[in-house]
Amino acid sequence: MEKKHPLPPFNEETAQQKVQMAEDAWNSKDPLKVSRAYSIDTEWRNRDQFINGRKQVQDFLSEKWKKELDYKLKKELWAFRANRIAVRFEYEYRNEAGQWFRAYGNENWEFDENGLMQKRYASINDLAIKESERKL
């Protein structure tokens, strides 16, 4: 059985590790690498999309990073308990037309006993910004 350490139940240190690992993986912009943190039957809500399973995660992320160029993400631990973690995040990207955006949001994560994320619920808002307003 595959495991993704640290395993739940989380304490502050291990919850922080999970958040940093997620940030690092997403900043790699490698859909396969990112998808390995999720259970085979993972369930996502990402904005208005519902994504089920690793294969759909990989497909979703491949399409995402074709459109969101120069993507850079920062995650921050918000809360944790047992096998759940909540984070706030912001990321910046530009579209093909050169318009920059900053996306803000919150995610709620639930992990299985092997440390794989089985549920991810993301609420995200985009704000058009000037290139000179970039922070990340």
Image (cartoon, rainbow, N blue to C red):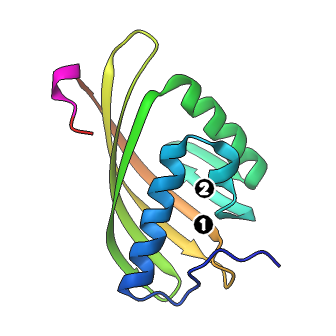
Dividing the picture into quarters, in which one does residue 115 lie? bottom right
> Which element is circle 2 on?
strand
| Residue drawn at point x = 22 percent, y = 31 percent | 134
Observer-nearest of 41 and 34: 34
Residue range in magenta is 130-134
Q: Secondary structure at mark 1?
A: strand
Work out whether residue 59 can be spotted: yes
**Among numbered discs 1 and 2, the one appearing first in the sequence:** 2
Badge 1 crowding class, 10 Å Cα cut-off, few under 14, some 14 to 19, many 20 or more, is: many
Q: Mark 1 highlights which residue?
A: 119
Give residue 93's mark.
none
Q: Whole-percent x and y of residue 127?
A: 27, 31
Name the residue furthest left: 133
Identified by mark 1, the residue type is Lys
**Residue 130 shows in the view:** no
Q: What count of labels does the image hold? A: 2
Mark 1 touches mark 2? (CB < 8 Å): yes
Tell me, yes or no, whether the highlighted magenta stretch contains residue 133: yes
The residue wearing badge 2 is: 44
Quick check: is 76 in the magenta stretch?
Answer: no
Magenta portion: prevailing SS class = helix
For badge 2, the amino acid type reads: Trp
Task: State the image quarter where residue 97 is shown.
Answer: top left
Compared with residue 47, is residue 12 higher up or lower down, i.e. above or below?
Answer: below
What residue appears at the point 43 percent right and 34 percent down from the top-left corner?
A: 71
Name the residue rendered at 37%, 64% in the picture: 87
Where is 78 relative to 112, above or below?
above
Q: Position of residue 15 (x, y in %)?
A: 43, 78
Q: Residues within 10 Å of mark 2 (few under 14, many from 20)?
A: many
